Each structure stands twice: as C-alpha cells, then as structure tokens.
C-alpha cells in the first residue's frame, strides 16, 4: 500500500478539476492505497475522511466585504510573487503543520493539479521534504494559452512556476495533445509527458434513473422541431470561447427563414450580457440546473452544441458529458483534441471557426427525433482514464 497526497483547488464534486481529482482519488482507493487530499474549502466541499479543506481566509473576508476580499487576495498574491509560498498564510499553515495532523509521514508520492499556481510550490517542497516523486497534472496551461489574461508579472512568475513544476516532476500529465506537444517542445528530455484527457462518468453515477422518472421535459412543446442544446458557460469558462458563439450566429444568419424556423436552440447556464444579446436572436435561455437535470436535457436533445474557441489546448469537460448522452455533437472551434475525440468515437463533427458556410450547411441538413448513437466511448470513461493516471503515479514511485 502506497500513501499518495493530492493537491487540488476544489473538491466539491461539481467543478471540472474536482471531478477529475475525485476520480483519481477513487482509483487509488479501489487499489487499496492510502490517499490524502489537501484543497480549499468552499461551500459544497465534500466532507470525506481523507479530504482536508481548511477555509481560506480570503473566503471568510469575502463573507463580510467583497471589496476587502479582492484587496486581500491582491496583497497576498503580491507577497507570494515577492517572497514565495513560505510567506503565504493559507499554504504556510499547511507546510508548518506537524506530519501527524495530515498523516503525511512516509509519503510515497505527490500529485499536483494545476492551474492554481501556489500548489506547484507546495508540491515541490513536499516532494523534496519526503524524498518522493511528484506528478503534475495541467488542466490548463500556465504559459501556453492560460485560462485567463495575465499581466507581465504574473506571466513571469507563471513561467518560473511551470519550469519548477516540470523540472521537479517525475511525469507531467496534460488534458490536451496541444498542451503536451508544447511541453515536449520547450522541455526536451526533462520529464515524461503524456496526455490523459478528462472523461465521462458512467450514467449510473449520475442518478439518471431517478431523474428520468420526473416530469421534466426540456423540449416538450417543440418535439416537431430539431432541438439543439448548449449546456454550461461560454466566456465565463474561457474568454476566447465567445468566438465560437459569434461563428455560430454567423452560420445561423446564412440560413433561410424556413431552415431557421426548423431549429429550436436552447442554452442552459449563466451568460454575460453580450452572450444573452446574441443568443436571444435565434434561441432561448434557461437558468442553470443540477448536473442530473443537465444530463437529462442532453439525452432529450436531438443534437448537442459544443464551443471551444480558437485556442489549441481547449478540451472542456462538456464534450465528455455529451459523449455519455450519445447524441450527435456539433463542435465549433479550432482545438485538435476535441476534433480527434469526435472523429475516433464517431460522436460528431468539428468545424473550424472560419468555416461558416460549412457550419450553415450542416445545420440545414439536421433531422429531428435523433436516436441514441451506438458509439464506442468506453476509452473515455473517467474511471478507466484515472486508473491509467494512478498507474502512472505508482510507476513513478517504483522508479525511485
């Protein structure tokens, strides 16, 4: 039995990073290993006996004043950039705590989930303290197509953090081929680089049976039309993904009135004002619903709409939820990994942002009352993929 520490930003059973690391922890547990998870506490964080989630002071400050919380985070970030992780109050308390509090004595490996940069430093320090290997999981790049815009100071320190993570790791895992290729090009012969994408949860884990017996019908009045669903965020997920919505609007505008009238396009989620303005021109919006209800809506739709924007490294969790729904997927974006997944699984087709006429032609040829696809998606099961991840970590221990 090996003892594994996982460092991740969230562990709430809802966010993408949380689902990935939750599945990885379950993989270790299924194999009989000892797992510890250190994360941030947020409302909805899971209370499990192997999860340690102290509340970040910035959250408690934010409960009294959002403005003070913003100032505190800025002050703390500046202190981190200037003096390092050992001066960062939240992580400093974890690093200074006795081994017995978190059960870290005789630690065998550390897994760090990025993009939260501070955890990289924590992982490096603990890997050195316990003389054990570290494996870093990049869900988004710190320097290559970062999740959000960064200033010059953040860019400089992100580069230092990324270099430290790669140089001190036994293996670097990425969720997309483009991110893995970038690491291999910039850090030749430094570490082992591999792509392990996210994946879908088995339907029984989503309690779809319970959801299916409810009266919820997201497309009931429009069953004679072609029902297209987009679920989740757009630019709130990544700013550049907004360009996919613009391309979709351009394609819709090419269609004749008769063809447009055949389409019932539903968006479920929280959207910005400019997104709402565009969507209302051709579709309708529902507010966010539970993951179970989202899964139900996906199975009821005829087609599922996926946006990835212009960036090469984007592989949203949405594509795997869509795979589990087994309905045809229309993807608009330039990232190669989603295109590969759709092509290999036979689950749909991706169109580049510039191919407006091709998108319009595809929309004009859609048919309603689509049956479930008989596609082979087993290789994208999150359990299978995280078993591959856990085996990689165990092999890194064996190589010591």
Image (spheres, rainbow, N blue to C red):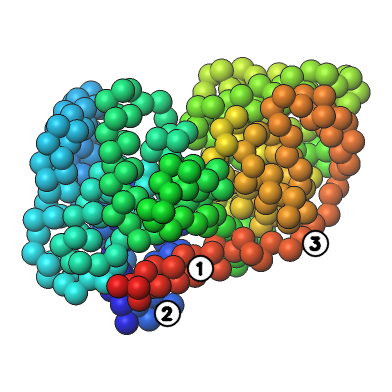
Report how far apart the C-alphas of labels 3 and 2 lie in the structure. Answer: 31 Å
Label placed on residue 374: 3
8 lies left or right of 375? left
The image position of residue 164, as x and y in percent, is 28, 47
Q: Nearer the viewer, mark 1 or mark 3?
A: 1
Report how far apart the C-alphas of labels 2 and 1 lie in the structure. Answer: 12 Å
Residue underneath mark 2:
31
Q: Nearer the viewer, mark 2 or mark 1?
A: 1
The image position of residue 66, as x and y in percent, is 25, 27
User: How would you rate the neighbour count of disc 2 (Cα within 10 Å): few for under 14, some for 14-19, many for 20 or more?
Assistant: few
Earlier in the chain: of badge 3 and badge 2, it is 2
> Residue drawn at (25%, 67%), measured in percent from left and top?
132
Q: Is residue 11 above or below residue 385?
A: above
270 lies left or right of 5? right
> Residue drawn at (59%, 63%), measured in percent from left and top?
381
Which element type, helix, strand or loop, lies under badge 3?
Answer: loop
Which element type, helix, strand or loop, lies under badge 1?
Answer: helix
In front here: 156 or 244?
156
Which element type, helix, strand or loop, lies under badge 2?
Answer: loop
Res. 1 image quadrant: bottom left
Residue underneath mark 1:
388
């Amino acid at each position: 039995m090996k003892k594994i520490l996982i460092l991740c930003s969230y562990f709430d059973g809802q966010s993408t990073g949380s689902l990935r690391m939750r599945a990885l922890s379950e993989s270790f547990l299924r194999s009989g290993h000892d797992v510890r998870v250190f994360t941030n506490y947020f409302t909805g964080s899971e209370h499990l006996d192997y999860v340690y989630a102290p509340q970040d002071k910035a959250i408690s400050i934010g409960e009294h004043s959002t403005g003070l919380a913003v100032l505190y985070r800025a002050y703390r970030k500046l202190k981190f950039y200037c003096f390092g992780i050992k001066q960062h109050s939240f992580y400093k308390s974890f690093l200074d705590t006795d081994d017995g509090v978190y059960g870290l004595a005789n630690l065998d490996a550390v897994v760090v989930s990025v993009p939260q940069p501070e955890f990289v430093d924590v992982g490096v320090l603990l890997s050195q303290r316990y003389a054990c290997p570290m494996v870093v999981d990049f869900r988004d790049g710190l320097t290559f197509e970062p999740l959000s815009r960064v200033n010059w100071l953040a860019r400089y320190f992100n580069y230092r953090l990324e270099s430290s993570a790669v140089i001190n790791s036994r293996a670097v895992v990425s969720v997309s081929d483009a991110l893995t290729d970038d690491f291999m090009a910039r850090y030749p012969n430094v570490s082992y680089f591999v792509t392990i994408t996210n994946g879908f949860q088995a339907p029984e884990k989503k309690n779809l049976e319970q959801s299916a017996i409810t009266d919820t019908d997201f497309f009931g009045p429009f069953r004679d039309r072609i029902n297209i669903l987009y679920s989740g965020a757009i630019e709130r997920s990544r700013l550049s993904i907004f360009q996919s919505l613009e391309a979709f609007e351009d394609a819709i505008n090419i269609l004749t009135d008769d063809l447009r009238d055949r389409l019932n396009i539903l968006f479920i989620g929280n959207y910005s004002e400019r997104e709402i303005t565009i969507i209302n021109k051709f579709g309708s919006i529902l507010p966010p619903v539970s993951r179970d209800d989202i899964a139900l809506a996906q199975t009821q739709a005829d087609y599922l709409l996926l946006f990835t924007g212009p960036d090469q490294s984007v592989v949203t969790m949405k594509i795997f939820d869509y795979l589990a729904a087994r309905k045809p997927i229309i993807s608009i974006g330039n990232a190669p990994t989603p295109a590969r997944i759709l092509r290999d699984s036979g689950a749909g087709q991706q169109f580049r942002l510039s191919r407006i006429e091709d998108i319009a032609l595809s929309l004009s040829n859609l048919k309603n009352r689509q049956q479930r696809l008989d596609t082979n998606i087993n290789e994208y099961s999150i359990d299978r993929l995280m078993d591959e991840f856990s085996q990689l970590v165990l092999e890194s221990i064996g190589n010591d």
